[in-house]
Image (cartoon, helix red, strand yellow):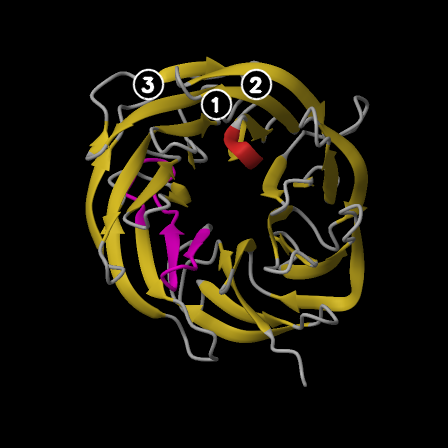
Amino acid sequence: MTAQALHFYIGTQGDGPGLGVFHGTLHPETGDMALLGLAAQVRRPTWLEPDHARGLLFAVSEIGNKGECEGEVFSFALGESDAPLRQIGHQSAIGGGTTHLCIDPSGEVLFSANFGGGQASRITIGTDGTLGPTTLSAPHSGSGPHLRQNKPHPHGVALSPDRKFLLVPDMGNDRIMIHALSPSGFADTAPTEHPLPAGSGPRLALFGPGGRYLYLLSELSAEVFVLEWNSATGTLRDVARVALDHPDAEGGASAAAFVLSADGRNLYASNRRSHTICTFAIDPQSRLPTLIQSISCGGERPWGAALSPDQRWLLVANQASDTVCAFQRSPEYGTLEPVGGATISVPMPTHIAFAAA
């Protein structure tokens, strides 16, 4: 029996006719890929968030990074055919530069980080995938020493395991902003702020298995931070930090993609300074990561990545070289091996989402 291809979608920085979300397939046995074409024309759909349980795909429209307009969120019906995506909903994030999404496990609420707007958004999701009203978090404040830190720039959103808090890494003010949530939206309280080193530029955060530890990737210092989460108080404690680069590395630090394997054994982070993918092994007792591999991304400026549903393959979106490359993952150690010839050309790719879990 011929193995069934795995369908995936590619978010990009494309903005214009013939650009947006692209559709591809991955052979589950060989790692070979095929590009099927444009799936949806959306302005700068830099992040994609699937809801596999309900067969939905959400995409940001990262416009308005300088505050000149509001970012947007789109919802689509997911399929595994060659047909383009079918748009279901469309809603303003009421904040510029919508750059990241996460979904409440109920499937009824979507959260976004608004890089240009300086806050997070909450958008309701209808049973049919339509998008309802948007509400905003309290605005962030502050800045940092880097040229790109002139004001708050929320870059990611992560929901606490008990769904009572939304954690927002803010690249502009070097803080994780912790917003308390109520059943109907953001609580009417000021967010708690967890400071990080000046100039680190927090980008994305992921909770590990069990929800005790939070892993955070900093863009401007290219480090992985480990923090302990106190669910009773909604606060964090610094535990450890690990650099993606050697101290004498040349050029400006820049990290982007951040992926946790389903079994919690490995973290993957992209290093745009050295055009590499870093593999971390997570100790099963301490939950601390150790860098065990740094491998060429197969292109330039790796921006996004995703593991296949079977965890056998890692796909990497190389923004500056307009390529998506495939890597085979070791089932024993989690290390990566490039798949020879497994590259497809896509304009300015930034993120990847698989159609099935």
The first of marks 2 and 1 along the sequence is 1
Residue 94 appears in which quarter of the rendering? top left
Query: Which residue is identified by label 3?
Result: 191
Of pointers 3 and 1, the one earlier in the residue sequence: 1
Q: Residues within 10 Å of mark 3 (few under 14, many from 20)?
A: many
**Left/right of residue 181 with respect to residue 292 in the rendered view:** left
Residue 71 is inside the magenta segment: yes
Q: In the figure, 58 relative to 161: above or below? A: below
Residue type at mark 1: give it: Gln
Q: Secondary structure at mark 3?
A: loop
Q: Secondary structure at mark 1?
A: loop
Q: Which residue is mark 2?
A: 199
User: Can I make out residue 40 in this image?
Assistant: yes
Residue at horizontal 38%, vertical 51%?
60
Q: Residue at x 81, y 55 (%)?
A: 337
Q: In the image, what residue occupies the spot 39% across and 55% down? A: 59
| Along the viewing direction, whichever of 48 and 215 lies nearer the viewer | 215
> Which amino acid type is shown beneath numbered disc 2?
Gly
**Region of the chain picked out in magenta, as a range:** 48-72
**Do labels 2 and 3 touch, CB within 8 Å?**
no
Spatial CA distance of label 2 from label 3 is 21 Å
Residue 245 in the image: state x and y as whole percent: 76, 29
**To which residue does mark 1 refer?**
149
Identify which residue, 177 or 281, lies in the foreground.
Answer: 281
Q: Quadrant of the N terminus?
A: bottom right
**Left or right: residue 335 compared with residue 233:** right
Of labels 3 and 1, the one closer to you: 3
Q: Of the residues shown, which amino acid type is indicated by label 3?
A: Pro
**277 magenta-colored:** no
